[in-house]
Image: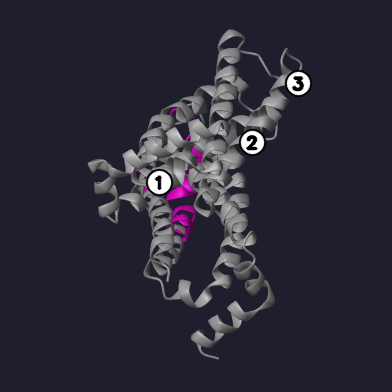
Amino acid sequence: MIPMAMSALGRFCQWLEQTSLSQLIQSLAWIVPTVQTVHILAISAVAASALMINLRLIGIAGADQSVQRVARRFLPVIWWAMPVLLASGAVMIIGEPARSLQNPVFQLKMLLVVTALALTGTLHVRLDRDPAWGESGHIGRAAALWTAAASLALWTGIVFAGRWIAYF
Amino acid sequence: MSLDAALRWLQDTVLATVVRENELLFPWVESVHVLAICLVVGTISIVDLRLLGLASLDRAVGQLTRNVLLCTWFAFAVAAVSGALLFSAKAVAYAGNFYFRGKLVLLVLAGLNMAVFHAFSGRGMTHWGAGVVPPPAARMAGAVSLVLWIGVVGFGRWIGFTLH
């Protein structure tokens, strides 16, 4: 990032920290742990859903069901968890703007989140267009394996980065 | 040896000392612990919601359970080992922490709930095919499990804010 943009971000963080909402979050000790608990529970829903889809794509688990059926059960969980994660994440950012927005690990986490969501969206569209996509012997089998591997790596990275924000 | 002496011995072992004093190791083990707990809670919720009849109704309970619980047990083993490492590093402090003790109690209760389910209410599982909502005792087991695991996550998060 260029220095000028950094200082603009720094000024924004300073302003945000002084808002009454930020002051309120900082003054009530129970808000941050409560919101973090909600955040982790929503991540649990996403991580388990992504795991179920990816294990089916690879062919390790749930082979008695089609890829599309597993995706139909678990993709909506990932999408519905996102507003919860965004809202709970926003409370943490407003409570401690500089510690999050200016944190390189936080910035990496957001990059990983955008990538993971783009990958999930692509999978969703592909399965809508071709219900047999990714099944063994069908079109997209190789892409399905790469999608699963990338998705597992990305969500693992997102959870790890979330923990490491506290250390930078 | 008293409990206090045992805790001191534990946190003075080489492994515990390394986890505590290495600046990188502690957050790495924490990251593994968080990921493992997310997968335990997330996958158990899939089973719990099916027991409650709220999701995955198109699948038989037994089939879903076989599919999901292997992941749960693997993740639980990882969470237990990483958790034991974190505990050993600050054994005296964790043992005296209200939320850590509470988390252990909730884990034991979750285990008891599961044992009771398998011994009694879960016996009819073979009859809970696709589209079948399990009987009240099984639904209750699912609800209790959900509440306990949400508590485990909450208490776990509070440890980080109260450990001295």
Q: Are marks 1 and 3 on the same chain?
A: no
The residue at which mark 2 appears reads as: A152
Residue at the (29%, 55%) spot, across then down: A30
Please provide the residue range marked out in magenta.
Answer: B111-137
Residue type at tag 3: Ala
Q: Are marks 2 and 1 on the same chain?
A: no
Label drawn at residue A98: none
Q: Is residue A26 left or right of residue B118?
A: left
Which is more foreground, mark 1 or mark 3? Answer: 3
User: Callout 2: residue from which chain?
Assistant: A
Q: Is residue A70 left or right of residue A11?
A: right
Between marks 1 and 3, how big is the CA–CA gap?
A: 38 Å
The residue at which mark 3 appears reads as: A142
The residue at which mark 1 appears reads as: B142
* Residue A148 position within the rendered picture, expressed as x and y whole percent measured from the top left: 67, 29
**CA neighbours of label 2 inside 10 A, class few (<14), some (14 to 19), many (20+):** some
Kind of element beneath mark 1: helix
Residue type at tag 2: Leu
Which is more foreground, mark 2 or mark 1? Answer: 2
Q: Main secondary structure of the magenta part?
A: helix
Q: Give the quarter of the image for residue A146.
A: top right
Mark 2 or 3, nearer chain start: 3
Residue at the (57%, 65%) spot, across then down: B86
User: Callout 1: residue from which chain?
Assistant: B
* Residue A144 position within the rendered picture, expressed as x and y whole percent measured from the top left: 69, 22
